[in-house]
Image (spheres, rainbow, N blue to C red):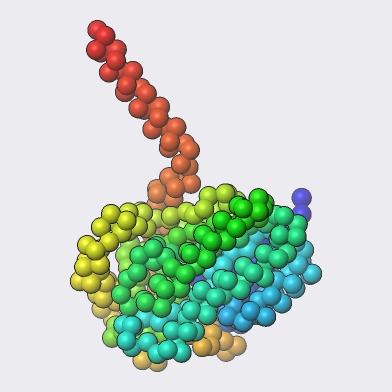
């Protein structure tokens, strides 16, 4: 059986890096798309050590022509793309009125339009042969905006709407190309050390924090089971989205009180910290940040919710069986 051909954007660090490594362990050929040369070199090594084949393709996903050329190169040199995973993003940690228009535009171009351009680039290949899977890596913030991340939240909301519209079109066409989305919790990625920040203290994900390998397991599962429109990953994601559906106004007030402090550590922000908004933090002479951020000591490696989210049928059957057993017991008791 030929090796699976997988493309991962944002593959140089964080979730993308962990996803690439996970597919490498399955023996896949993984095309790695990112800007940072040091990170791409590290990701290439990770995939190869895991047992896969890695092909780094330096690309800025905000450049539609470059992304299309990358997809064409994979199809020409490696073979038909089986799975394309969009992860690449950038952001700015700051109150909305401290984000410059050009910065907001750049976040949108990378974190939203990058998904659009990549999906367009691979979809034209997949639709020709009527097969393939596209996974959009999202966030609980695709549904629930939080303070200090207006640009990122806007982009994730946009990806969610674009994903739903595209899925409807593919269903209308009765296409066998599948698209699914994975909504992530807070993850221990390097972004909190390299995203442009104007906060007084070092940025952090809102606890609870999960390790990138946990997120990667969810992405790989979604790629294998893409008929579901989306997956919610982590108990915190489920809780946040449920609360937002029931009482969004209450959540507004809660985040207004807690959202500033919960996204910052007690450590002062380093004014000389790198920023990857305009240029990769891990450039030719830079540091390979890897998959993990600086929160290993507090990050969780797993969550039972992940299994539950992937086995709705089993849980549904168990619940039905339990309900039937209880009903039978009650009826027998009444009969006696």
Residue occupying image coordinates x 69% and y 75%:
68
Residue 106 higher or lower than 50, as above or below: below
Figure quadrant of residue 40: bottom right
Q: Is residue 243 left or right of residue 134?
A: left
Residue occupying image coordinates x 28% and y 54%:
246
Q: Is residue 91 left or right of residue 203?
A: right
Provide residue 35's location: percent of width, then percent of height.
Answer: 59, 81
Residue occupying image coordinates x 40% and y 48%:
304
Residue 149 higher or lower than 157, as above or below: below
Q: Nearer the viewer, residue 20 or 125?
A: 125
- Considering every residue shown, the one lying at the far right of the view is 76
Residue 285 higher or lower than 164, as above or below: below
Provide residue 324's location: percent of width, then percent of height.
Answer: 37, 23
* Residue 50 seen in the current view: no
Provide residue 162's location: percent of width, then percent of height.
Answer: 52, 66
Residue occupying image coordinates x 49% and y 84%:
106
Provide residue 258's location: percent of width, then percent of height.
Answer: 22, 70
Q: Nearer the viewer, residue 286 or 177?
A: 177
Figure quadrant of residue 142: bottom left
Q: Is residue 159 left or right of residue 250?
A: right
Quadrant where the C terminus lies? Answer: top left
* Residue 79 seen in the current view: yes
Q: Tell how many labels.
A: 0
Q: Nearer the viewer, residue 69 or 163?
A: 163
């Amino acid at each position: 059986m030929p090796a699976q051909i997988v493309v991962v954007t944002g593959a140089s660090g964080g979730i993308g890096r962990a996803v690439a490594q996970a597919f490498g362990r399955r023996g896949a050929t993984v095309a790695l798309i990112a800007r940072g040369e040091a990170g791409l070199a590290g990701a290439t090594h990770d995939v190869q050590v895991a047992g896969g084949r890695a092909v780094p393709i330096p690309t800025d996903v905000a450049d539609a022509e470059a992304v299309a050329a990358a997809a064409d190169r994979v199809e020409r040199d490696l073979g038909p793309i089986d799975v394309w995973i969009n992860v690449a993003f950038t952001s700015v940690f700051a109150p909305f009125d401290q984000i410059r228009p050009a910065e907001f535009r750049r976040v949108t171009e990378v974190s939203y339009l990058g998904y659009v351009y990549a999906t367009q680039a691979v979809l034209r290949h997949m639709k020709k042969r009527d097969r393939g899977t596209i996974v959009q890596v999202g966030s609980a913030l695709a549904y629930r905006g939080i303070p200090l991340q207006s640009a990122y939240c806007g982009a994730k909301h946009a990806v969610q709407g674009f994903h739903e519209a595209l899925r409807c079109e593919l269903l209308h066409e009765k296409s066998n190309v599948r698209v699914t989305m994975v909504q992530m919790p807070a993850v221990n990625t390097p972004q909190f050390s390299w995203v442009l920040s104007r906060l007084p203290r070092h940025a952090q994900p809102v606890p609870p924090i999960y390790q990138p390998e946990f997120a990667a397991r969810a992405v790989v599962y979604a790629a294998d089971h893409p008929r579901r429109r989306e997956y919610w990953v982590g108990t915190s994601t489920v809780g946040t989205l449920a609360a937002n559906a029931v009482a969004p106004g209450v959540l507004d007030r809660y985040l207004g009180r807690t959202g500033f402090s919960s996204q910052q550590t007690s450590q002062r922000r380093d004014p000389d910290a790198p920023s990857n908004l305009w240029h990769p933090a891990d450039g030719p002479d830079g540091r390979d940040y890897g998959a993990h951020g600086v929160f290993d000591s507090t990050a969780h490696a797993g969550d039972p919710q992940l299994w539950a989210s992937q086995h709705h049928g089993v849980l549904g059957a168990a619940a039905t069986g339990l309900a039937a057993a209880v009903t039978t017991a009650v009826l027998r008791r009444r009969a006696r």
